[in-house]
Image: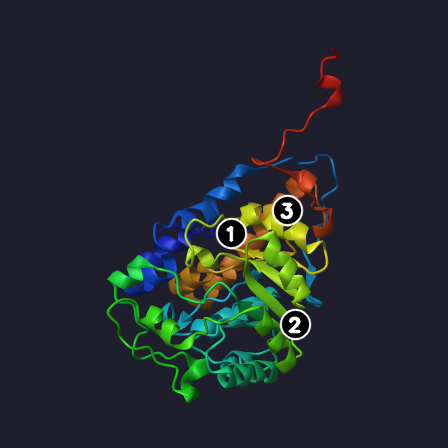
Amino acid sequence: MGEITNVSEYENIAKQKLPKMVFDYYASGAEDQWTLQENRNAFSRILFRPRILIDVSKIDLSTTVLGFKISMPIMIAPTAMQKMAHPEGEYATARAASAAGTIMTLSSWATSSVEEVASTGPGIRFFQLYVYKDRNVVAQLVRRAEKAGFKAIALTVDTPRLGRREADIKNRFVLPPFLTLKNFEGLDLGKMDEANDSGLSSYVAGQIDRTLSWQDVKWLQTITSLPILVKGVLTAEDARLAVQSGAAGIIVSNHGARQLDYVPATISALEEVVKAAQGRIPVFLDGGVRRGTDVFKALALGASGIFIGRPVVFSLAAEGEAGVRNVLKMLRDEFELTMALSGCRSLKEITRDHIVADWDTPRVNPRAIPRL
């Protein structure tokens, strides 16, 4: 294989290196995988309106997220069971994020615990939370994350049941026996039983709380002082409810197209959510980001930042920590170049006028309208 020149090239390398069951788990989406394709394709329906002859000799990519200063608006989304990709798993990802000066979100279903990830050294980290039927488990987990120095909770709200991922059913997916869901090890919830379909699907059906509602977003605020990001919002209605429920932010996400198929791409849902939030809380996006141009498009549509998921596990499988570092560097470099070529020197200079989306009404020059 020649030199890696973009983020997407890691997927094929991961496919060659990983067991089929593992690669399929990371790569697949729900059912027909229409949304999986659409998460990528929708970006290509947004074009640039670059501004020229602007001094772009100095470009500042830095931003703040929930008051934390980071080097760029590119962060790491929670992805489960990273030790299936590489023996160092979440440790490697944490070190890569810290080196890049950005935020890592640790999955509830990580193969390394909150304490282990904290032990890798300094860094701003968020914790993704699944709400278990046993609320004592939830409270204990949130307390441990807080104590380990995690700075926010990303509450996943699109998974009362697991989406139908047919590759996992065919492969009878199960967490390999030498690994555990480390955060739950001491609670006897760290192992996954073999099942007739997907072992993960059975685990979710047994453990995850289907009664989860907006009331629980309020409850969570009574047990932690950490800010809560609601992850999995796709509509204006739910954006308004998130604001009302005291969320500190919203992540526009369709769970990497792994839950409900035929929901829109996140980049297509973003603007509706941003408008509904009315600037009261920040809105982030995950799903389908593979290029610096994608990052710019999301920010032009009002996102405060983006999160990447699959590129992390694919690059981790290919090259461990160095792979994840490289993905973050390539995205950063591409994004910086996109800013320069669009005439933007800081994130606040990226505006809606820098893009045109296929759903926009055409811009009309009033002088071009013939007089009747």
Please give the residue where the numbered disc 1 appears in the rendered image.
Answer: 289
Q: Is residue 212 left or right of residue 122?
A: left
Is residue 70 something that shows in the picture?
no
Looking at the image, tell me whether mark 3 or mark 1 is earlier in sequence order. Answer: 1
Q: Quarter holding the C terminus?
A: top right
Q: Nearer the viewer, mark 3 or mark 1?
A: 3
How far across and down, in percent of the image, does residue 40 sit? 47, 46
Q: Nearer the viewer, mark 2 or mark 1?
A: 2
The Cα atoms of the two marked residues, 3 and 1, are separated by 14 Å
- Which mark is on residue 227? 2
Residue type, label 3: Leu
In the image shown, does 259 or 67 lie closer to the viewer? 259
The residue under the point 58% across, 84% down is: 143
In the rendered view, tell whether residue 178 sits above or below residue 29.
Answer: below
The residue under the point 74% across, 38% down is: 54
Residue type, label 2: Pro
The residue under the point 51% across, 40% down is: 44
Please give the residue where the numbered disc 3 appears in the rendered image.
Answer: 301
Disc 3 secondary structure class:
loop
Is residue 163 something that shows in the picture?
yes
How far across and down, in percent of the image, does residue 298 sit? 60, 49
How far across and down, in percent of the image, does residue 305 sit? 62, 57
In the rendered view, tell whether residue 6 sits above or below residue 48.
Answer: below
In the image shown, does 263 or 363 lie closer to the viewer? 263
**Residue farthest to the top, as pictured:** 372
The residue under the point 39% across, 82% down is: 189
